[in-house]
Image: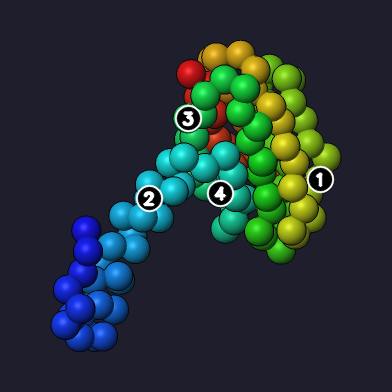
Amino acid sequence: MPLPRSLPAAALAALLCALTPAIRADSAAASTIVLAHDFMFAPAELTVPAGSTVTWTNKDDEPHTVVGDGGLFRSGALDTGESFSFRFAQPGTYRYACSIHPRMTGTIVVK
């Protein structure tokens, strides 16, 4: 949608701020990145197409792991800024947790 040229800068800034949460929500839904942050996985549930690679990145100051319930995937301890990736070839629901902090859980749904 084109914006009128006469739109004041303050109005343009307000419009962009109002649209930013919607843009971020759409981007997060399509993302294949999961963050370990504040002792949670975010997003806690992620839906991806078969063949997608999901990357978990630790943004906490404490180490975390990513361990699939069925043992299909398992990272080592990830320090701050480190990542682990896994390619989900088959459709299904894959639950995982941090073996160091078991209350940290997540789910990958592969379509």
Crowding around mark 2 (Cα neighbors within 10 Å: few <14, some 14 to 19, many 20+) is: few
Q: Amino acid at mark 2?
A: Ala
- Assess disc 1: are there few (<14), some (14-19) or many (≥20) residues with their C-alpha within 10 Å of its C-alpha: some
Q: Are marks 3 and 2 in contact (CB under 8 Å)?
A: no
Residue at the spot 54% in from the left edge and 15% down from the top edge: 92
Residue tagged 1: 77
- Asked if residue 70 can be seen in this view, the reply is yes
Mark 3 or mark 1, which is nearer to you?
3
Residue at (74% x, 20% y) in the render: 71
Q: Which residue is mark 4?
A: 40
How far is disc 3 from disc 2 in space, using C-alphas? Answer: 14 Å
**Which residue is more in the foreground, 38 or 47?**
47
Q: Marks 1 and 2, Cα distance to the nearest angstrom?
A: 29 Å
Viewer-nearest of discs 4 and 3: 3
Q: Disc 4 versus disc 3: distance between alpha carbons?
A: 17 Å
Q: Which circle's residue, 1 or 2, is located before the other in the chain?
A: 2
Which amino acid is tagged 1? Ala
CA distance separating discs 4 and 2? 18 Å
Give the CA distance from mark 3 to mark 1: 25 Å
